[in-house]
Each structure stands twice: as structure tokens, then as C-alpha cells.
Image: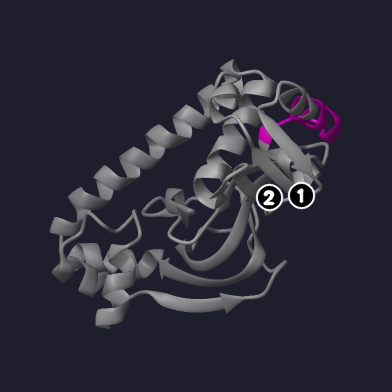
Amino acid sequence: MQEKVLVLKSIPLFNSFTDVELAMIAEIVQDREYKKNRILFMEGEPGEAIFFLYSGKVKISKTSEDGREHILDIADPGDTFAEVVLFTGACYPANAEVLEDARVGLIRNADMEKLVQEHPSLALTIIQILSERLIQSQMQIKDLAFHDVFSRTASILLKFANLHGISTEHGIELSLPISRQELANMVGTTRETVTRALMTFKKSNAIDINRQLVRIVNIEKLKSWV
């Protein structure tokens, strides 16, 4: 149990709780292991639980009416997703698919609601955390609305550099965990358009590209596109 408390404390969603509160939460966490390509849930399905990652990667996406996929996020270890269903009884607002073999923790809504009823002090911390998640979602919507394709592509590369980048003498190297098409889906554009943006960054000497490997050779120049 103590090991699970330490794991929960390292996850941003839970690091505002006290050790006593984390111990209570740890008792209702269910651990699962999923293979690559496993679908955790689909948009529109009843929202029964919130999830967080111990290891692996999970793609969060939505599908438009014409069948196009838009990737909202790539969840990494320590990330949480599907918080929106907590206490609301809402359906899952997006799809979740395992990109790399993953170890996942989940907390069922019914178990969390029962815990909060028994320990009302937990409610305030949870409200504060969910409010922060709402602000982040609003910022993402603003980014899609007001930033052009080049800006959004640069922003995503910088995000991956922060999460997956390895500093070398030649720059920051990142091996993208997604395909060129999936990158385009994250940006909200076509594969051809995001490829054009990448080539523009390369011509401006901000990045270098070799298949799935992207090397940021001038991070300040790349930031200037944001």
C-alpha cells in the first residue's frame, strides 16, 4: 500500500492530497495492464472511471462526423485522463487507445463518490484540481482557434521536446511516438500541411528531420513560430 501511495504522490492529479488522503485513494485504485492498440474506451460510452498512467502511452482522440481523427493528447506516465466524467455521470467525451504497452490505474466513479461521502474534506481538493484541468482545456481550445498550423505544429514539437527530448551536442533529439498522420491529427490539419510546416522549419534551420527522428537544432528559432 505504501508503494502505491508513493506512486500516487508522483502523479500531478494527486500530489495536492495529504499522505492520509492518498492512502484512502490508494485503496480504491485498480491496476490494469493493456497491450498496444487496446481501446480503453470510446467516445459516447458511459463514463465509469478516471484513468492515470504508470507506464506506456495512450492516445486521446475524437472522430469527426466525416470520420477524420483529431488527436487531443498523448498521455504519458503520470498523466491522467477522463477526469471530466468524475461526479457527472457523463459519457466519455473522446476515445482512448493504447499506443505502447501500458500499466494503467483506474478509479471507478462509484468508489470515488463513496469515498468523498465518507470523507467530505476530499471534495475541495478535487474541485481545485478539476478546475485546473478545465483551464487547461480552455487554453487548448484557444490554441486551436487563434494559432495557425505552423504555430500549432511548433508548439507540439516543443511539447514533445520537453517530454521526450534528449539533449545532444547536435541539438535536442526526439523520436516521435506517433506517425506523421497522427501528428497532423494533433495539429488539426492534413498530413501534407504538417509535412510542409516541418520542411519550412527545416529550411529555416530550426529543426532537422530523419524519418521519425526530429532534432531541434535551434530551439529559440522554433519558439519564434509559436
> What secondary structure is marked by label 1?
loop
The picture quadrant where one finds residue 24 is bottom left
Q: Quadrant of the C terminus?
A: top right
Mark identifier at residue 176: 2
193 left or right of 46 in image: right
Contact between marks 2 and 1 (CB within 8 A): the answer is: yes
Residue 176 position (above or below residue 115): above
**Label 2 crowd bin: few (<14), some (14–19), many (20+), radius 10 Å:** some
Q: Which residues make up the magenta segment?
A: 187-198
Residue 40 point in image, percent of width and height: 61, 65
Assess whether residue 6 is covered by the magenta stretch: no
For the residue marked with disc 2, what is the amino acid? Leu
Name the foreground residue: 76 vs 38.
76
221 left or right of 119 in image: right
Residue 34 position (above or below residue 153): below
Q: Main secondary structure of the magenta part?
A: helix
**Residue assigned mark 1:** 212
Q: Earlier in the sequence, mark 2 or mark 1?
A: 2
Mark identifier at residue 222: none
Which residue is depicted at the point 45% across and 69% down? Answer: 106
For the residue marked with disc 1, what is the amino acid? Gln
> What secondary structure is marked by label 2?
loop
Name the foreground residue: 161 vs 134.
161
Residue 74 point in image, percent of width and height: 59, 50
Residue 92 point in image, percent of width and height: 56, 52
